[in-house]
Image: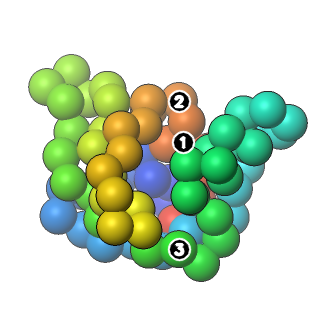
């Protein structure tokens, strides 16, 4: 499976699973990234970090390390 970090600009992906533990996973879920939600990849910063996303109708920036924990299809 691929992760959110590997998704390309302009793609809309669906969250399959969240990896990680405890506070990190909780923080990602608090941002609205939960199983089954669709995420649109808006843009990626010049050096690849952070990634700008549209989730549940709002914009969100996510670090590469956190994006790696989100499995998508």
Label annotation for residue 68 = 1
Sequence order check, earlier mark of 1 and 3 = 3
Q: Position of residue 35 (x, y in %)?
A: 65, 71
Q: How busy is the neighbourhood of tag 3: few (under 14 within 10 Å), some, or many (20 plus)?
A: some
Where residue 69 appears, as percent x and y from the top left, is 62, 45
Label whose residue precedes the other's in the sequence (2 or 3): 3
Residue at far top of view: 47
Mark 1 vs mark 3: in front: 3
Residue located farthest toward the front when viewing the structure as drawn: 58
Instruction: Name which residue lies at 53% across and 30% down.
Output: 65
Residue bearing the label numbered 3? 37
Q: Is residue 52 left or right of residue 18?
A: left
Foreground tag (2 vs 3)? 3
Could you tell me which residue is drawn at 75 percent across and 43 percent down?
26
- Displayed quadrant of residue 56: bottom left
Task: Tell me if mark 2 has few (under 14), some (14-19) or many (20+) residues whose alpha carbon lies within 10 angstroms of its own.
Answer: few
Determine whether, in the image, residue 11 is placed left or right of residue 73.
left
Q: Is residue 30 above or below residue 57?
A: above
Q: Residue at x 31, y 51 (%)?
A: 59
Residue 65 — which label? 2
Q: Are marks 1 and 3 in contact (CB under 8 Å)?
A: no
Number of numbered discs present? 3
Gap in Å between the C-alphas at discs 2 and 1?
A: 5 Å
Q: Of helix, strand and loop, which one carries label 3?
A: loop
Rendered residue at 33%/30% (across/down): 50
Kindly state the secondary structure of the residue where label 2 is placed.
helix
- Judging from the image, what secondary structure is the residue with disc 1 in? loop
Nearer to me, 52 or 49: 52
Q: Is residue 66 above or below residue 69?
A: above
């Amino acid at each position: 499976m691929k992760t959110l970090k590997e998704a390309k600009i302009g793609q809309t992906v669906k969250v399959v699973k969240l990896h990680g533990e405890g506070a990190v996973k909780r923080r990602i879920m608090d941002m609205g990234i939960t199983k089954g939600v669709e995420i649109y990849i808006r843009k990626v910063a010049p050096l690849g970090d952070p990634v700008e996303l549209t989730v549940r109708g709002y914009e969100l920036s996510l670090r590469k390390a956190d994006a790696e924990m989100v499995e998508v299809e």
